[in-house]
Every structure is written in structure tokens, then in C-alpha cells.
Image (spheres, coloured by chain):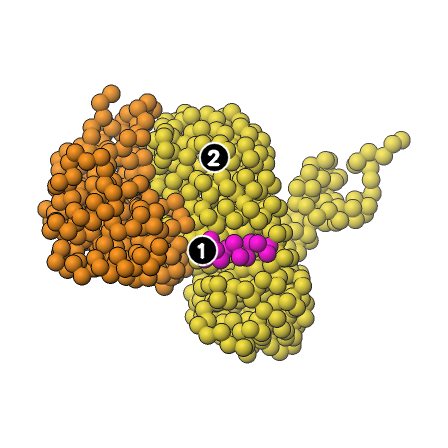
């Protein structure tokens, strides 16, 4: 008799599944049959929960007993832009409580948009002896005191990655809490902390952690200090530098270029605070190897950029500020044929005088045919430019265009930007993520619904003419996972048009649209496995549902919802 | 359909405005007078004394229609009040901020003059995380010199225009203009004492030397600060050279500017 999937011995299955690295593979494997499901759940080591309310800690720990690594994401993405009130939720402590019992050998915790208190960090540090790896991105609720606890008690720490959090920075002492005998650190990123750390402690740490491969310091570290760190750690693969603000060209700063020349493994460079042409040349020795260059905190101009890019032919990812202007983007097009990702951030979103325009975007698309990820903040754009970009780069997977004036039309023709996004979705069949902006009618959404068959994430603001807009998308795009909408004229019928989609989606966010409580109630009645939550604003009419968050869950309604979150 | 015409603050009407309208554009023009009036009722007062906020209708340039479209949204859920005009950037009045007005702070303050039906502010737009916003805000005051130098590389070339005796600065985009005639017309509208028009009627256009001659005759004189920090008379040099080196403009009283002319001629000779 031929072996069937369910007749294979469990040990064999477990060993095989433990070799799988991707979550998707694990998920697929668990669906084959009950036998495989059982084997797989016993071997799963890493789990990624992209909405912390889609499942409860109890359900998670019951299904997967052997987890060593957890990624948890909490608040809706628009919380990054202050659209979610404080005290909304996403507290990590209930999870840590469950993990302390179920996963005493937990090694890695990566949190995004969660609320993390100092007590939670201390709890983490004290309850998991094997704990190695902490990453906090866009979280809030903790201070540097929590970092002290991590530094003090995590004897096997390999990774501490603190980025862009709402952290109370009470001083740089935390770094001095790493004990002398801690030598295991491989990743240290404190680039977005503001206080100065003890340089002696940092130097000693870098010196004794021979496996350190990622070091990202903050702005308070100067060039002289950076040089000393580089001399100690030439093996680094990723470096985030401190401040380039040095008025004098002293001999010790000259030594910086030599230190860089010994760093043959560097592929990622970031920081560049206050960089000018005076000291930028220090990094030239490593430019040739760079694949990721993050200049998004360096307000440099096109000439400085060109100097770096001319030496960085292998660049795959580039982040810049719009002070480089269209001229700088032309340089990108000329020098970076391997470029796959470009992000252009605005130096001052509220000042119109500087920036990049349609011509810069076109220039990049001409010179970088492999481009598939773009995030572009600009003051104005044209349909023609985006159509050209789509022709030049048909492989876009992520197209995020932010025309910073709401409802801004094509500045040459005064027409809506419908055709621009139409061209993108028609041409770029692999498109997974789309952020639209500018003046858009329902036509843009008709295009999206008709052509964007692989679209997973959609962000919409100040767009559309009627319910039809959203209906086109909800009915036309089968792979939607996350939809976030703000300030659009979409009402209840638009909300309800997504009925068949919501259970296979991660979440839907709608704020300041035309949705009413009745509409939300109707949705909640029809779909029992969804949480339909309304965040009530002060002064809202009873019928108005100004912020709606809909997500699939197996955990039922939230038990920790604050009073302003109403689950229907 | 007939479109109400209004001269925006730089006095240009939008020749490029397309005549075919989508339904959105149609309703923009219909609601335009109301929305503009609302805005005028609530804006920070930035006009110069004597500058006529004429009751005449406005044409929005393509890049400047953003604000009117704000009220397009049928729900009227939000609109911008005067303090947040800066973030629309595209709206005409936003270009007249005085340098010490910080748009980001303005946005956060609640000014009681919001249109009643609207949410007070456009929270969280553009979508940039706080850390970056805070960092850039701190940077921009430090790096004002660096970024000024990069003006020419962008698609716009904004320079500040000040007039002696006026309490507020204006900003204009030099790249919109192609010669001194256009510039002078725009400034004339903006600053009503600037009487360049006299004596020019009937001529084809202005050459650089004509402009210089006329300036000597009028009450106000247009000067500019160049890259070296020197103050020069506008009109001395070819247009391209002018926009390449102009960092800011200043309308002086004629008497003050007399001493400039010889020096600027010298400098011009040296450059050429």
C-alpha cells in the first residue's frame, strides 16, 4: 500500500517540519490533514501574530507548545499618525504572562505597535533565562529604565533593537548596565534614542562582543568616537552612524576614512546626521560594497548625493530626504542600475519650497528598471509621469505615492490622478501594496478593483467620490489583507460591500468616512467571526461611527477594550 | 461653463486650467466662492495693508486648488482652518507665511476660527511617524542655510519678498516666470505701490535695461540678494543669471537704492 500523508510516522514528520523556515510553509503543511496538523504544531518554533487581537494568548499557547520566537503586532498602522487614541490597547503583558508559563525557553520577542511598560520589560528580563533577542518598533509606554532591566538580567542577549518608539528617554545610563561578562551581543540598535550614552561603556561593550555585526548608534556619538568603535569592530555588516557635525578637520577625524577602509563586510550604512561634504568622504571606502544606504536623516543636496552614489554601484535599497531634489534623483537614475527600493522622505512636510517632483520620479524609473518598491513624498505629480514610471518599471510590488496636499490634482492638466494609479495597477501585475493620494474619483478605484488582483495592502486618504469607489475595490481584489481608509466619502453600503472579504482579511480601518453605527451593527450581525469595533470620539453624534476597526478573530470580542471602544 | 475668475495673490490667471471638468472639478467651482469666503473669514490675516482682498473671484492654479477641494467632500467632515493652511502648501495663501511661523505648531494649536461643521485639524497627515517629524522639525531650523542652497535644484525656486514698511513677507516661486516682465507684473499685483506699469504701455516687453530705467523713476525699487550676500538691483543681469543667483527679493524705497546701481554694474561686469 502506498504511504499516504497521514500514515507517515510522526517523528519523521516532526523532523521534516522542523526544517521548514517560512511561516507560510508551516501554515500550509498544517492544513494537509489532522496528522500533519498535530505534528506541525509540536514543531513550530516561530509564530508571527500580525494582529494581537486576532487570537488570544491562551489559544496560541494551547496550539503551539514549543514556540521560541514570537512576533506580535498590535495597533492599527494609522496609530503611527496619531489616529488611534491613547489607551486603546495592545498591551504586551497578558502575552508575557502566558509565555512565562508556556514558553519558559522563549528566546526572541519582536513587537510592533504594542504598548510595553517598564514593568513588562523587567518581567521579560527576569522570567526567561534563555532570552536572546528583543526588538521594539513603534512601541510606546516604556522608558530607558526598562532597557536597564534588559541590560542587567539578560545574560545571553544577542539582539537589542530599539527603533522609533514612544520612549521616555531618561538618560543614557541604561547602556552601562550591561555586565562586563556579557560578550554575546550581535545586534545593537539605539539610533533613535536621544540621550547620550556613556562612551566608555559603549566602547567596552563593542570591544568585548566579538560577534557584533550590527551597530547603530545615536546622534550623540561623534565622528571621533565612531572611529574608535570602527577600529574595534571592523567585522560589522551594518553600521548606523552618529553625528557628522564637526567643524574642524582634525587628524583623528582623518583616521575615520582609514578605519572605514578596514570594514570590508559593511553592506548597510545609516545615520549620517548633519552630514556635509566636509566629512562624507570618510565613508567612500565602503560605498562600493553597500547594498542598503539610508540617508533619510541626512539633509544633503544633490551634489553630496551624487558623490556617494557614484561610488555605490551595488545599491539595492536607498532612502533619502527630498533635499536632494530632482537633480539628486537624476543621479540615482544614472548611478544605481541595481536599485530595487527607493524611499524619499520630506524634509518639511508643511513647507512647499523644497522637494522632489514628477520629473525626479521619472528619472529614477528610467535608470532603475529593477525598481519594485517606492515610497515617494512630493508636493505635486502628473498622470503622465506616473504612466511613464509604470512603463519603465512594470515590476512594482509596493507603490506608495504620497502627494502631500490632500486632493491635489495633476498639476499640469488639473485632472484627477485616476489615470496614474490606473496605469500602475494595469501594468504592475505583481502589485501587493498600494498607497494612493491626490485628487481621485471612483474611477481610480474602479481600476484598482479591475486590475489589482494581487493587491494585499491598500491605503487611501481623501479620495473617491462615492460608495462605489470602495465597493469596486472590495468586490474586485481577492487577496486583500489590510485596508486602511481615512477621510473618504464611503458610507455604510461601501462598508457592507466587503462582507465576503473581511474574514479572509487581517483588518479594515475606516476613519472620518460616512459610516454610521447602524451600518456597523449590520456588519456585526452578518459576520460573527469578526470584531467590529467603533472608536467613539468625544462630541460624536450617537449615529456617527467616526473610527471603525474591523478584523477577523478567533478570540471573540476584546476583554480589555477601553470605554471608548465599542464592539458591536 | 463659466468659471469665476479671481486673481490670486501673484496676479496670474491660470491659462492652463483645463476646460473639461470632471464632476469633481465642476462642483469645486460651484462651491468655490463659498469655500474661499469661508477661508477668508478664518484665515490668519496675511495681506498687506492696502492690498486689496478684492471681492473678485479667484482662479486657483492647478497646484493651488487643494483647499477648495477640501470642502468638496460632501460630508464636510473636515476642512482646514487658517492655522493649518501651511500644510496644504498648494493653497495660495500658504505661501505667504512669515519665517517665524512654524507650520507644524500651528497645526497643533486649536484656533477657534474653524468652520463649524469641520473637524478641527487634519491630524496625522502627511503620514510620517513622530520620530521623523520631530527630528526634521529640529533639523530644519539648523540647516536653513544648507537647504536654501538647494533651492535651485528642486522643481520650485521660492524666494522671500519683503517690502520696506510692510509687516509681512511673501514668498514667490521664481521658476513660474520667464522674464522680468512677468515677475514685475506679479509683484505689482502683490505690492500695490510698485508702479512699474507706468510708461511701459505699448512696448513689446521689457528688456533688462528698460527695467532698470523704469525703476529709477518709481517710488519703489526692486532689489535682490545674491548668492554672495550682496544686494543688487533687479534687472541688471540676464534673467537666467538672475534666477540662478537670487536668494531673496526686497522692495526698497527708491532713495535707499540709489547707491546700489554703480556697484551692481561693476559686479556684473566682473562676472561676465
Seen at 53% across and 28% down, the residue is A426
The relative height of residue B120 versus residue A215 in the rendered view (above or below) is above
Q: Which residue occupies the foreground of this view, B192 or B101? A: B192
Task: Look at mark 2 in the image and give the residue it sits on.
Answer: A386
Seen at 47% across and 35% down, the residue is A386
Report the chain holding disc 1.
A
The chain assigned the colour orange in the figure is: B
Q: CA distance from mark 1 to mark 2?
A: 24 Å
Q: Does residue B29 appear left or right of residue A90 in this picture? A: left
Please identify the residue farthest to the top as the structure is shown: B1
Residue bounds of the magenta highlight: A300-312
Whichever of callouts 1 and 2 sits on the residue coming sooner in the sequence is: 1
Does the magenta run of residues contain B241?
no
Residue B115: x and y in percent read 21, 41
The chain assigned the colour yellow in the figure is: A
Task: Look at mark 1 in the image and give the residue it sits on.
Answer: A301
Seen at 34% across and 47% down, the residue is B240
**How busy is the neighbourhood of tag 1: few (under 14 within 10 Å), some, or many (20 plus)?**
many
Q: Which residue occupies the foreground of this view, B52 or A491? A: B52
Q: Quadrant of the C terminus of chain A?
A: top left
Element type at mark 2: helix
SS assignment for the magenta stretch, majority: helix
Residue B129: x and y in percent read 43, 52
Amino acid at each position: 500500500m502506498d504511504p499516504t500523508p497521514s500514515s507517515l510516522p510522526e517523528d519523521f514528520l516532526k523532523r521534516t517540519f522542523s526544517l521548514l523556515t517560512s511561516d507560510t510553509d508551516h501554515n500550509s503543511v498544517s492544513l494537509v490533514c489532522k496528522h500533519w496538523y498535530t505534528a506541525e504544531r509540536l514543531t513550530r518554533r516561530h509564530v508571527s501574530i500580525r494582529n494581537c487581537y486576532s487570537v488570544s494568548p491562551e489559544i496560541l499557547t494551547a496550539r503551539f507548545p514549543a514556540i521560541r520566537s514570537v512576533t506580535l503586532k498590535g495597533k492599527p498602522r494609522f496609530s503611527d499618525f496619531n489616529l488611534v487614541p491613547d489607551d486603546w490597547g495592545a498591551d504586551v503583558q497578558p502575552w508575557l504572562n502566558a509565555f512565562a508559563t508556556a514558553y519558559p525557553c522563549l528566546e526572541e520577542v519582536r513587537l510592533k505597535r504594542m504598548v510595553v511598560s517598564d514593568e513588562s520589560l523587567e518581567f521579560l528580563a527576569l522570567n526567561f533565562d534563555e532570552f536572546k533577542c528583543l526588538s521594539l518598533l513603534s512601541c510606546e509606554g516604556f522608558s530607558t529604565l526598562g532597557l536597564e532591566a534588559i541590560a542587567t538580567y539578560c545574560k545571553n542577549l544577542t539582539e537589542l533593537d530599539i527603533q522609533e518608539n514612544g520612549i521616555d528617554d531618561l538618560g543614557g545610563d541604561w547602556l552601562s548596565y550591561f555586565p562586563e561578562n556579557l560578550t554575546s551581543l550581535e545586534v545593537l540598535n539605539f539610533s533613535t534614542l536621544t540621550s547620550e550614552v556613556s562612551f566608555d561603556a559603549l566602547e567596552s561593550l563593542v570591544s568585548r562582543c566579538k560577534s557584533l555585526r550590527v551597530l547603530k548608534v545615536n546622534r550623540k556619538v561623534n565622528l571621533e568616537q565612531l572611529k574608535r568603535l570602527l577600529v574595534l569592530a571592523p567585522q560589522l555588516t551594518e553600521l548606523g552612524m552618529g553625528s557628522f557635525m564637526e567643524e574642524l578637520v582634525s587628524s583623528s577625524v582623518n583616521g575615520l576614512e582609514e578605519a572605514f577602509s578596514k570594514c570590508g563586510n559593511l553592506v548597510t550604512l545609516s545615520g549620517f546626521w548633519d552630514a556635509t561634504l566636509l566629512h562624507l568622504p570618510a565613508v567612500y571606502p565602503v560605498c562600493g560594497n553597500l547594498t542598503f544606504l539610508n540617508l533619510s536623516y541626512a539633509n544633503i543636496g544633490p551634489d553630496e548625493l551624487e558623490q556617494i552614489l557614484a561610488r555605490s554601484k551595488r545599491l539595492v535599497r536607498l532612502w533619502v530626504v527630498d533635499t536632494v531634489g530632482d537633480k539628486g534623483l537624476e543621479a540615482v537614475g544614472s548611478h544605481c542600475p541595481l536599485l530595487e527600493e527607493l524611499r524619499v522622505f520630506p524634509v518639511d512636510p508643511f513647507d512647499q519650497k523644497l522637494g522632489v517632483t514628477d520629473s525626479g520620479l521619472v528619472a529614477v524609473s528610467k535608470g532603475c528598471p529593477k525598481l519594485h518598491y517606492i515610497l515617494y513624498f512630493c508636493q505635486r505629480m502628473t498622470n503622465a509621469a506616473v504612466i511613464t514610471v509604470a512603463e519603465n518599471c512594470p515590476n512594482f510590488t509596493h507603490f506608495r505615492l504620497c502627494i502631500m496636499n490632500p486632493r491635489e490634482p495633476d498639476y499640469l492638466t488639473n485632472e484627477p490622478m485616476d489615470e496614474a494609479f490606473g496605469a500602475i495597477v494595469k501594468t504592475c501585475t505583481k502589485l501587493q501594496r498600494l498607497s494612493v493620494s491626490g485628487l481621485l474619483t471612483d474611477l481610480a478605484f474602479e481600476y484598482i478593483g479591475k486590475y489589482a488582483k494581487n493587491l494585499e495592502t491598500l491605503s487611501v486618504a481623501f479620495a473617491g467620490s462615492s460608495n462605489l469607489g470602495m465597493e469596486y475595490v472590495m468586490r474586485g481584489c481577492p487577496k486583500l489583507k489590510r485596508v486602511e481608509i481615512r477621510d473618504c466619502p464611503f458610507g455604510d453600503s461601501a462598508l457592507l460591500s466587503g462582507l465576503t472579504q473581511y474574514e479572509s482579511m487581517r483588518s479594515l480601518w475606516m476613519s472620518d468616512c460616512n459610516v454610521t453605527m447602524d451600518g456597523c451593527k449590520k456588519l456585526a450581525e452578518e459576520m460573527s467571526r469578526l470584531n467590529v469595533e467603533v472608536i467613539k470620539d468625544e462630541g460624536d453624534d450617537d449615529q456617527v461611527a467616526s473610527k471603525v476597526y474591523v478584523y477577523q478573530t478567533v478570540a471573540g470580542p476584546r476583554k480589555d477594550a477601553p470605554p471608548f471602544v465599542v464592539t458591536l | 461653463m463659466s468659471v469665476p475668475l479671481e486673481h490670486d495673490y501673484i496676479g496670474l490667471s491660470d491659462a492652463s486650467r483645463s476646460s473639461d471638468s470632471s464632476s469633481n472639478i465642476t462642483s469645486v467651482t460651484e462651491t468655490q466662492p463659498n469655500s474661499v469666503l469661508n477661508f477668508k473669514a478664518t484665515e490668519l490675516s496675511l495681506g498687506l495693508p492696502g492690498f486689496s482682498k478684492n471681492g473678485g473671484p479667484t482662479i486657483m492654479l492647478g497646484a493651488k486648488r487643494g483647499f477648495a477641494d477640501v470642502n468638496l467632500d460632501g460630508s464636510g467632515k473636515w476642512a482646514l482652518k487658517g492655522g493649518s493652511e501651511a500644510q496644504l502648501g498648494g493653497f495660495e495663501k500658504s505661501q505667504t507665511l512669515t519665517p517665524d511661523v512654524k507650520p507644524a505648531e500651528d497645526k497643533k494649536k486649536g484656533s477657534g476660527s474653524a468652520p463649524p461643521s469641520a473637524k478641527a485639524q487634519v491630524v496625522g497627515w502627511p503620514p510620517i511617524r513622530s520620530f521623523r517629524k520631530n527630528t526634521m522639525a529640529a533639523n530644519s531650523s539648523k540647516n536653513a542655510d544648507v537647504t536654501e542652497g538647494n533651492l535651485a535644484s528642486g522643481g520650485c525656486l521660492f524666494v522671500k519678498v519683503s517690502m520696506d514698511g510692510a509687516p509681512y513677507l511673501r514668498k514667490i516661486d521664481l521658476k513660474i516666470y520667464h522674464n522680468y516682465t512677468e515677475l514685475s507684473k506679479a509683484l505689482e499685483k502683490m505690492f500695490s505701490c510698485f508702479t512699474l506699469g507706468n510708461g511701459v504701455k505699448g512696448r513689446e516687453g521689457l528688456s533688462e535695461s528698460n527695467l532698470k530705467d523704469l525703476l529709477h523713476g518709481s517710488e519703489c525699487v526692486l532689489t535682490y540678494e545674491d548668492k554672495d550676500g550682496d544686494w543688487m538691483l533687479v534687472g541688471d543681469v540676464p534673467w537666467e543669471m538672475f534666477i540662478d543667483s537670487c536668494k531673496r527679493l526686497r522692495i526698497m524705497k527708491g532713495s535707499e537704492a540709489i547707491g546700489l546701481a554703480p556697484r551692481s554694474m561693476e559686479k556684473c561686469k566682473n562676472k561676465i
